[in-house]
Image (spheres, rainbow, N blue to C red):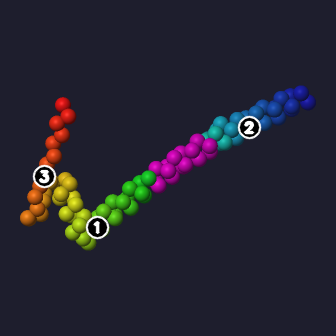
Amino acid sequence: MRLLYTILLLIIGLLSYHYLAGNNGLLDAQRIEKEVTLQSQNNALLLERNTALKNEIKDLRNGYDAIEERTRNELGMIKQGETFYRIINDDN
């Protein structure tokens, strides 16, 4: 009878170990849940960035205002007939 209890106890112990720490066990499931949460947050950031890029592409395709703004800011271009003033601070 004592041998039977020992065997049952070992079986229960092994099953508990596999349930908690084995492949696809409880600890593995918690780790995967954290990874899914992190990936969902990352996906939300990427979706937001993609939406902003799509809106910018749409603006560049449909209107001249966005193109004009880009050329002014990035290339330093001015329209014909405009006067460009450069202000230099002498705070040295």
Relative to 79, say whether 75 is above or below. Answer: above
Residue beneath label 2, please? 16
Query: Which residue reaches farthest left?
Result: 81
| Residue type marked 1 | Asp
Residue beneath the point at 50% across and 50% down: 41
* Structural distance between the alpha carbons of marks 1 and 3: 28 Å
Relative to 19, say whether 66 is above or below. Answer: below
* Structural distance between the alpha carbons of marks 2 and 3: 77 Å
Residue beneath label 3, please? 85
Residue 3 is left or right of residue 73, and the answer is right
| Residue type marked 3 | Tyr
* Quarter of the image where the N terminus is located: top right
Callout 2 crowding tier (Cα within 10 Å): few <14, some 14–19, many ≥20: few
Which of discs 1 and 2 lies nearer the camera? The answer is 1
Residue beneath the point at 29% across and 64% down: 57
| SS at badge 1 | helix
Which of discs 2 and 3 lies nearer the camera? The answer is 3
| SS at badge 3 | loop
- Frontmost residue, 13 versus 39: 39
Residue 61: x and y in percent read: 25, 69
Residue beneath the point at 78% across and 32% down: 10
Q: Earlier in the sequence, mark 2 or mark 3?
A: 2
| SS at badge 2 | helix
